[in-house]
Image (tube, rainbow, N blue to C red):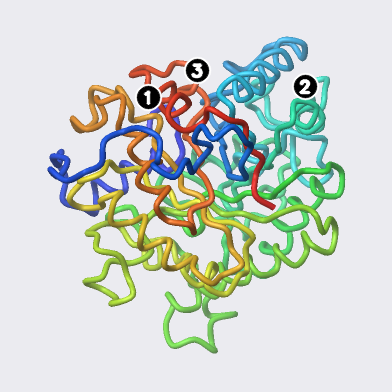
């Protein structure tokens, strides 16, 4: 994946599992601009309640720190600069990746310091990034959501490259190499408990506004490779009709148990998940969306629709990283589908937006139009279930190659907004 990114920006998966190619925007698509009723912060002179978030990724130093080995003062200065940029764009939430690869951006007793700070896994950076982020975000009126990747251990497949004290080296039976990476095995109850313990340590220490998971549960499929969880399935899968059902139950248990433990430790902390944007295609399941894409239910064993319908999570942010009119996964088809899933549920719906695609010459023609993202917010404003948007990611927020984010702010964020509660 080169410089590792969030689900390869969901692009690699889509290109492997959908009909590819740029799709022309349909003739009837909406023009950019604020919604007629002033939703999403439109200019009616009063603050509204909606999510306006940005992901701040640390894996492979994608967004922050800009490189390894900066001094503590330089790291801190860069972090505060990202928080200030969020405020400048009238955002209200920063989702900071604090456990990118079974490591930590706080002094965790469970896992080593992340190498993204110093370049050496396990080496203390001389300050507390997560503690500082929470304090400084709150001082600016921002929420700070702590983003954890549950099962990714390393973006390479050599356990010897992990620090000697790493839990994955102390418990090699917990680890499955797959796709050139190392993963914790979600089928082992002791792994599930450990992952929760590591996450809950941060919740105990800091008043984070939310625990946030991304879209990595079981690893995305790699052609010609098998995720070897035979021993775990033999030991724990006897009650299930097939391995896929057992794997989904493992992820369901992670979600339910994590939710309960967060509330027990810090009742005011939310739990949100940002899954791949397609649950299942209607051609596979009549409850699915009108799409032809990878299905998270089947590919990574994440029953995201159930988590929302059952109200297990406080919010969901499907990664709707496609343009209006994209034939295989049309933003305009997915928004009403997710709105219907969220209707009547306690789970709030926010939409993940592909800011990183705007102005990228490698993307379809729609993404060369600076109004594309603004059109997304206009379209979503017609769905009361949609309570806001989160943009991927911070580096593109700063660069704003096509001026797409400036257009969003001008069209939709004229007034401040507080996150929904």
Q: Residue at x 70, y 18 (%)?
A: 80
Of circles 3 and 2, the one toward us is 3
Picture coordinates of residue 271, whole percent (x, y):
67, 56
How crowded is the residue under tag 2: few (<14 C-alpha within 10 Å), some, or many (20+)? many
- Residue 51: quarter of image: top right
Picture coordinates of residue 318, whole percent (x, y):
45, 52
| Element type at mark 2 | loop
Of circles 1 and 3, the one toward us is 1
- Residue 370: quarter of image: top left
Q: Disc 2 designates what residue?
A: 125
Picture coordinates of residue 135, whole percent (x, y):
82, 30
Q: Nearer the viewer, residue 184 or 358?
A: 358
Q: Is residue 304 above or below residue 222?
A: below
Picture coordinates of residue 412, whole percent (x, y):
46, 33
| Element type at mark 1 | helix
Q: Disc 3 designates what residue?
A: 398
């Amino acid at each position: 994946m080169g410089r590792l990114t969030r689900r390869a920006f969901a692009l690699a998966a889509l290109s492997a599992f959908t009909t590819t190619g740029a799709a022309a925007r349909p003739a009837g698509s909406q023009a950019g601009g604020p919604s007629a009723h002033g939703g999403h912060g439109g200019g009616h002179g009063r603050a509204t309640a909606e999510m306006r978030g940005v992901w701040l990724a640390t894996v492979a130093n994608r967004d922050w720190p800009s490189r390894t080995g900066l001094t503590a003062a330089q790291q801190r200065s860069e972090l505060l600069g990202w928080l200030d940029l969020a405020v400048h764009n009238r955002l209200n939430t920063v989702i900071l990746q604090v456990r990118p690869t079974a490591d930590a951006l706080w002094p965790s007793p469970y896992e080593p310091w992340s190498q993204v700070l110093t370049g050496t896994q396990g080496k203390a950076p001389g300050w507390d990034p997560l503690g500082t982020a929470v304090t400084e975000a709150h001082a600016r009126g921002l929420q700070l959501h702590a983003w954890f990747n549950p099962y990714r251990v390393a973006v390479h497949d050599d356990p010897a490259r992990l620090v000697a004290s790493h839990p994955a080296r102390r418990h090699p039976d917990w680890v499955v190499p797959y796709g050139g990476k190392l993963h914790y095995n979600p089928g082992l109850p002791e792994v599930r408990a450990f992952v929760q313990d590591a996450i809950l340590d941060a919740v105990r220490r800091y008043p984070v506004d939310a625990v946030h998971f991304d879209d990595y549960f079981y690893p995305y499929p790699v052609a010609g490779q098998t995720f070897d969880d035979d021993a775990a399935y033999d030991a724990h899968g006897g009650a299930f009709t097939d391995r896929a059902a057992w794997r989904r139950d493992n992820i369901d248990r992670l979600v339910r148990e994590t939710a309960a433990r967060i509330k027990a430790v810090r009742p005011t902390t939310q739990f949100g998940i940002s899954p791949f944007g397609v649950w299942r295609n209607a051609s596979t399941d009549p409850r699915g969306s009108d799409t032809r894409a990878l299905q998270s239910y089947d590919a990574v064993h994440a029953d995201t629709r159930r988590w929302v319908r059952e109200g297990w999570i406080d919010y969901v942010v499907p990664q709707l990283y496609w343009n209006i009119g994209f034939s295989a996964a049309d933003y305009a088809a997915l928004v009403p589908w997710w709105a219907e899933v969220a209707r009547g549920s306690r789970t709030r719906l926010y939409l993940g937006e592909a800011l990183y695609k705007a102005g990228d010459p490698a993307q379809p023609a729609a993404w060369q139009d600076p109004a594309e993202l603004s059109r997304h917010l206009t379209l979503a404003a017609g769905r009361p279930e949609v309570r806001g948007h989160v943009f991927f990611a911070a580096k593109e927020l700063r660069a704003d190659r096509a001026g797409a984010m400036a257009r969003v702010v001008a069209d939709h964020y004229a007034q401040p907004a507080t996150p929904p509660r």
